[in-house]
Image (cartoon, helix red, strand yellow):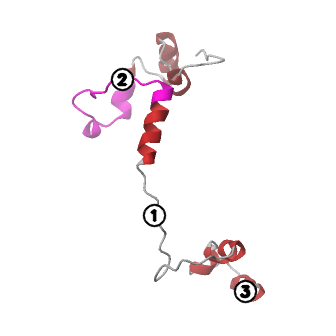
Amino acid sequence: MTIQSNPSAFADRHIGARRQADVDTMLKAIGYDSVDGLVDVAVPGAIRQEHALRLGGALSEVEVLAELRRLAARNKTAVQMIGQGYYDTVTPPVIRRNILESPAWYTAYTPYQPEISQGRLEAL
């Protein structure tokens, strides 16, 4: 299989073998005569679609990125509600990192040495 040293198009960088010679080499290496034969073995009939996808024309990489940005702009930032309620306070980073973000404090299982967690609690 030949590999391009400097692919410039999005499809060349992200889609597998597309030239027939490359496809034939791949199929020969895995022991199949055709892509259809490979798909027949790999994809169960119960999950196959009966008709082809109705896709629009391909977009360029710039167009895809613009569309993804448009979709991302629709996201809404929400406030995390931790615990019984939300209080608009500032938690010092050292407390947040060592207590709130440490699973040893909020999981029932501390591997092998529970005294380590107790020692950390006393140190804090």
**In this view, which residue lies farthest toward the left?**
50
Asked if residue 85 lies left or right of residue 54, the reply is right
* Other-residue count near label 1 (Cα within 10 Å), few / some / many at <14 / 14–19 / ≥20: few
Q: For marks 2 and 1, give the one nearer the viewer.
A: 1
Q: Earlier in the sequence, mark 3 or mark 1?
A: 1
Task: Choose top left, top right, bottom left or bottom right for residue 8.
Answer: top right
Q: Position of residue 43 (x, y in %)?
A: 35, 35
- Marks 2 and 1, how far apart in space? 49 Å
* Other-residue count near label 3 (Cα within 10 Å), few / some / many at <14 / 14–19 / ≥20: few
Asked if residue 34 lies left or right of residue 19, the reply is left
Q: Earlier in the sequence, mark 3 or mark 2?
A: 2
Q: Quadrant of the N terminus?
A: top right
Residue matched to label 1: 78
**In this view, which residue lies farthest toward the front?**
88
Closer to the camera in the image, 46 or 62: 62
**In this view, which residue lies farthest toward the top?**
21
Which residues make up the magenta segment? Answer: 37-63
Kind of residue at disc 1: Ala
Q: Circle 3 — which element?
A: helix
**In this view, which residue lies farthest toward the right?**
123
Q: Residue at x 65, y 18 (%)?
A: 6
Q: Which numbered dot is residue 37?
A: 2
Q: Residue at x 43, y 41 (%)?
A: 70
Kind of residue at disc 3: Glu
14 up-or-down from 117: above or below: above
Asked if residue 89 lies left or right of residue 62, the reply is right
Magenta stretch contains residue 46:
yes
- Residue contact between numbered discs 3 and 2, judged by CB atoms under 8 Å: no
Residue matched to label 3: 115
Q: Position of residue 28 (x, y in %)?
A: 49, 17
- Marks 3 and 1, how far apart in space? 37 Å
